[in-house]
Image: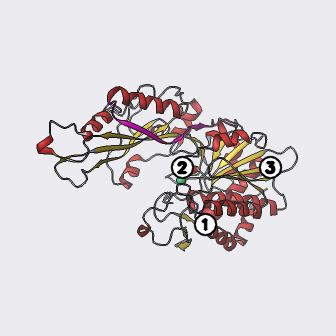
């Protein structure tokens, strides 16, 4: 058996696939502002139908979920494919070399908002279904595609919507393609994601900025109060000091630790690539020295300060600012719960600086699939059928996706097969997707479906 037939199909249809992707990029779908969202749901329906799936728009209470289903042979596995059709806002237009909602091809890449995150990647999955349906062997499994319209705003309605669709989603396994491939460009299969809790701490001081000579030592300075508060939340050695944030955290299994150890890691080079010569403080376990355990850092809880801002104090006048704001996030490891983490933060702040206000924004639960879960080997075999070297498992690490609705909500093992280039610039100006990766991604996605269906 081979996947040469799919490769042929993909190479015969290159121009058409690129044109359809460009059309998809041309439909704005900014969930944060609502720009283009109703048109985008319609367009997604059309793409699903054109790929052989029966489309349906499912109301969620927010932006709709667009689904598509195509049955496979009697008794074959049922695969859920998760993606999202909403995109991030464009950010400053002058930083784009071409308009974000007009696909432009330069140097083998398609540029435009959503090329990598996530339209190009879920469209590759749809085209895999289309290619398999057109092949002599046919589609070896049932497929239900779920296109989320709220991923970029934290998918607030997804878990409840999926719970209401449990009868339709009596599936065996889920796959998704999002984010860039591993920095080393080694092929990887992601076993879940970390969760996230984003929040803002605001400390209010005087009604407006005050002269620091006339008021220093007399008027409370909200910036000092804020930095002091933050210093009580994370120790210089990297330990997170927010009591109760790690409730429920479970140890990595031996297989997960082995998978982490097998992932290539070159921290000095990675850091040098972003202009840094030092690593973040981190409470390493005693057996770890040198580079050991760096991958584990990406699988365990984090606490990051995203930005520190003073209102009225930005231009370095000698003042006591009126307001100080820290934007922060915590990435959640296996076993942590977003609501528990949020409570722990709220309690920590209230006990130390009661007049500080904490507001929570995006929250997502972590999701875990074990390296020996059902279909893990089939997914790996499918990726291997198209990769030039053996693929590796990456246990739940890195960024966040709302797939806990699939793993915890529906009880499905869930596998991530990122397709985009490392420098896809998702969420940034000049987002792009290497077209070779887009076309190869269709073949990979088709090979994974054949492998799951036992037809590789
Ligand atoms: Zn995104």
Residue nearest the observer in this picture, 319 or 147: 319
Residue ID at (80%, 49%): 142
Find out whether residue 77 is within the magenta segment.
no
Mark 1 crowd level (few <14, some 14–19, many ≥20, 10 Å Cα): many
Residue ID at (18%, 53%): 317
Upstream in sequence: badge 3 or badge 1: 1
| Residue 5 x %, y % | 77, 64
The secondary element bearing badge 2 is classed as helix
- Specify the quadrant that holds the N terminus: bottom right
Residue nearest the observer in this picture, 357 or 407: 357
For the record, the magenta segment spans 353-374
Residue 326, placed above or below residue 250: below
CA distance separating discs 2 and 3: 30 Å
Find out whether residue 366 is within the magenta segment.
yes
The secondary element bearing badge 3 is classed as strand
Q: Locate residue 22 relative to residue 305 in the image: left or right.
A: right
Upstream in sequence: badge 2 or badge 3: 3
CA distance separating discs 3 and 1: 29 Å
Upstream in sequence: badge 2 or badge 1: 1
> Of tags 3 and 1, which is closer to the observer?
1
Q: Locate residue 230 relative to residue 329 in the image: left or right.
A: left
- Residue at the spot of label 1: 27
Residue ID at (41%, 32%): 288
> Of tags 2 and 3, which is closer to the observer?
2
Please, which colouring scheme is shown? secondary structure
The secondary element bearing badge 1 is classed as loop
Residue nearest the observer in this picture, 55 or 143: 55
CA distance separating discs 2 and 1: 18 Å
Circles 2 and 1, Cβ within 8 Å, touching? The answer is no
- Residue at the spot of label 2: 153
| Residue 192 x %, y % | 59, 41
């Amino acid at each position: 058996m081979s996947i040469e037939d799919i490769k042929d199909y993909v190479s015969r249809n290159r121009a058409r696939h690129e044109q359809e992707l460009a059309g998809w990029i041309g439909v704005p779908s900014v969930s944060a502002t609502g720009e283009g969202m109703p048109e985008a749901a319609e367009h997604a329906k059309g793409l699903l139908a054109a790929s052989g799936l029966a489309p349906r728009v499912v109301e969620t209470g927010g932006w709709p979920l667009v689904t598509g289903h195509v049955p496979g042979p009697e008794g074959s596995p049922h695969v859920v494919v998760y993606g999202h059709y909403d995109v991030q806002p464009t950010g400053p237009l002058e930083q784009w070399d071409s308009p974000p909602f007009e696909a432009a091809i330069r140097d083998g890449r398609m540029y435009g908002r959503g090329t990598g995150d996530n339209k190009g990647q879920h469209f590759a999955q749809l085209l895999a279904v289309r290619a398999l349906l057109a092949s002599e062997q046919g589609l070896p499994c049932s497929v239900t595609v779920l296109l989320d319209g709220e991923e970029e705003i934290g998918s607030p309605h997804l878990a409840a919507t999926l719970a209401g669709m449990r009868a339709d989603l009596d599936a065996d396994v889920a796959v998704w393609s999002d984010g860039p491939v591993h920095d080393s460009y080694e092929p990887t299969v992601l076993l879940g994601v970390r969760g996230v809790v984003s929040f803002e701490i605001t400390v209010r001081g005087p009604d407006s900025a005050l002269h620091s000579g006339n008021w220093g030592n007399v008027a409370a300075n909200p910036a000092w109060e804020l930095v002091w508060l933050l210093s009580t939340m994370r120790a210089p050695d990297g330990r997170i000091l927010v009591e109760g944030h790690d409730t429920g955290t479970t140890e990595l299994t031996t297989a997960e630790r082995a998978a982490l150890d097998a992932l290539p890691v070159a921290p000095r080079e990675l850091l040098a690539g972003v202009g840094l010569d030092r690593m973040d403080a981190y409470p390493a376990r005693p057996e770890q020295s040198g580079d050991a355990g760096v991958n584990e850092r990406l699988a365990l809880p984090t606490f990051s300060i995203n930005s520190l801002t003073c209102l009225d104090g930005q231009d370095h006048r000698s003042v006591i600012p009126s307001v100080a704001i820290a934007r922060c996030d915590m990435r959640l490891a296996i076993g942590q719960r977003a609501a528990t983490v949020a409570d722990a933060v709220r309690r920590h702040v209230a006990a130390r600086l009661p007049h500080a206000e904490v507001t929570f924004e995006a929250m997502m639960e972590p999701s875990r699939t074990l390296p020996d879960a059902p279909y893990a080997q089939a997914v790996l075999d499918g990726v291997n059928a198209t990769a030039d070297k053996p693929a590796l498992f990456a246990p739940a690490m890195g960024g966040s996706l709302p797939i806990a609705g699939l793993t915890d909500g529906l009880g499905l093992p869930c596998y991530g097969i990122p397709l985009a280039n490392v420098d896809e610039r998702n969420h940034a100006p000049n987002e792009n997707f290497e077209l070779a990766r887009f076309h190869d991604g269709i073949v990979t996605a088709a090979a994974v479906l054949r492998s799951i269906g036992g037809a590789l």
